[in-house]
Image (cartoon, rainbow, N blue to C red):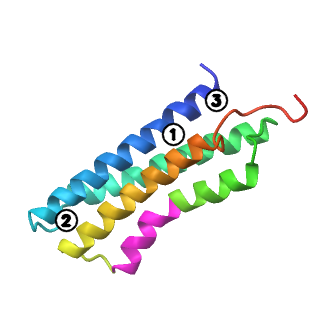
Amino acid sequence: MTLQDIHGILFNMHILYSVILGIWGAVMAARRESISGNYWGAVATATILAAAVTLVGIVMTLEGLRPARLLTYFLYMAWLVIIMPGLYSLLKGRDDRSAAIAFALLSFFNATTSISMWQRAIVSPWMLPGA
């Protein structure tokens, strides 16, 4: 299994995980529940997963592989890594219904952003320059 395969698997995991996180947040908001510790752990996991995808991308870049648009790739990945903790900071750790809605919407947005990256070939294929 190559690093490109691992990158693709982790990236697909991030898309699916973001969708599930969005559904979970929307269900909590619909039930008027506060955000549980389990959900906070899932938000942290989503951030760690995005960081793992970025780390694999950095390793592939250091090996000389490049996607079609390297700068765009790293800008998007930086967004995916920092936005969930950023929203937590903006909301100052609130765990009410509106915070659940905000996290659900952001999770769906992250999933659609990742799908857009995939559709526009920003995440693959990684090739050697000039190949």
Amino acid under label 2?
Answer: Ile
Residue 97: name its quadrant: bottom left
The question of residue 89 being in magenta is answered with yes
Label 2 crowd (10 A; few <14 / some 14-19 / many >=20): many
Q: Quadrant of the C terminus?
A: top right
Q: Tell me which segment is drawn in magenta.
A: 81-91
Amino acid, disc 3: Gln
Q: Quadrant of the N terminus?
A: top right
Residue pictured at 13% horizontal, 63% vertical: 30
Please tell me whether residue 23 is drawn above or below residue 65 in the rendered image: below
* Label 1: how many Cα within 10 Å (few below 14, some 14–19, many 20+): many
Question: Contact, CB < 8 Å: mark 1 with mark 2?
Answer: no
Q: Nearer the viewer, residue 80 or 40?
A: 80
Secondary element under disc 2, as helix, strand or loop, is loop
Mark 1 or mark 3, earlier in chain: 3
Q: Given this view, does label 1 or label 2 mark the residue nearer the observer?
A: 1
Q: Is residue 122 above or below residue 94?
A: above
Neighbour tally class for label 3: few under 14, some 14-19, many 20 plus, Cα within 10 Å: some
Identify the image quadrant of residue 93. Answer: bottom left
Q: Which residue is mark 1?
A: 11
Q: Which residue is mark 3?
A: 4
Q: Which mark is residue 131?
A: none
Q: Earlier in the sequence, mark 1 or mark 2?
A: 1
Q: CA distance from mark 1 to mark 2?
A: 26 Å
- Closer-to-camera residue (45/123): 123
Residue 35: which numbered mark, if any? 2
Q: Earlier in the sequence, mark 3 or mark 2?
A: 3
